[in-house]
Amino acid sequence: MSDAKDWVDRATSTAFAESPQVSLKDGGIIIVAAPDDAVAGDVCLQVGIGTAEQPACVVATSVAPERLDSYISDRAPTQPALGFVDATPNRPTPAMKESVQALEDIPSSRDLLQLTTAVGDVREAIAPNDQPVNIVIPTFGSLLSAAPTDRVVRVLAHIAESNESDGRVVIGLNYTAGSNETLQTLKAHSDVILWAERDGDGTVRLDSESL
């Protein structure tokens, strides 16, 4: 995990120098792959909730909730509902609690069944009329470190299949922290991969690959 100071507050977010040429189609699994957790998580959150025109559920698996405050607490009240699943040892701040419409606390992200259930409960709470929901997991690598890859991939596929047809599942992945085999397995079950890298001046450059 990158130091907390490396995470970019949405209020002072990095600029995207290049927009992806592949359409980020709804209804798919999008991998945001970067050489560190901070960039992967930052881009993942911006893709998943930054401009979302539909409800979104953020799943914190290893990043302390306060690092996500700037992405959540400044969300305009006129935007669609936002839910939060906290699977970290930390508890959300009061500001975050006031900014989300549904919140589920679970002891750990290691219990994948409990995690899947919590995501489903939040999704139903923020989209009672079965509208599409974006599921956003900024640090997906913590799930991969807690269980075999094939099991985590099955959970990811289940979450995507349970989501409505136009909802995205966006995951942030530090591709330097795992094996190439794991990355290839994830790519085989995904629709688009965004490759993200931060320049020395803080600008994030994106490339994309349709899978």
Image (tube, grey):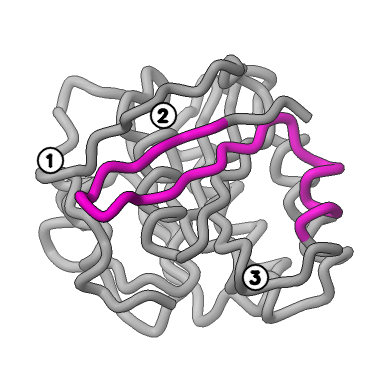
Task: Count residues near mark 1 (Cα–Cα under 10 Å), then give few for <14, some for 14-19, many for 20+.
Answer: few
Disc 2 versus disc 3: nearer the observer: 3
Residue beneath disc 3: 143
SS state under label 2:
loop
Closest to the observer: 134 or 206?
Answer: 206
- Along the polypeptide, which appears first: circle 2 or circle 1? 2
Residue drawn 49% across the image and 28% down it: 128
Left or right of residue 157: residue 194: left
Tag shown at residue 55: 2
Asked whether 147 or 43 is in front, the reply is 43
Does dot 3 land on a helix, a strand or a loop? Answer: helix
Which one is nearer the viewer's eye here, 136 or 17? 17
Residue type for callout 1: Asp
Cα–Cα gap, marks 2 and 3: 23 Å
Q: In the image, which residues are magenta?
A: 183-207
Front residue (pair 4, 159): 4
Q: Earlier in the sequence, mark 2 or mark 3?
A: 2
Residue 185 forms part of the magenta stretch: yes
Residue 194 vertical position relative to residue 53 in the rendered view, above or below = below
Instruction: State which tag comes first along the sequence, 3 or 1.
Output: 1
Q: Give the alpha-carbon distance from disc 2 to disc 1, as whole Å.
A: 15 Å
Q: Is residue 106 above or below residue 184?
A: below
Dividing the picture into quadrants, the one containing residue 12 is top left
Instruction: Decide if residue 107 is on the left or right side of residue 183.
Output: left
The type of residue carrying mark 3 is: Leu
Give yes or no for residue 111 being in the magenta stretch: no
The amino acid type of the residue labelled 2 equals Pro
Which class describes the residues within 10 Å of circle 2: few (<14), some (14-19), or many (20+)?
many
Q: Which residue is mark 1?
A: 74
Q: Residue at x 57, y 21 (%)?
A: 24
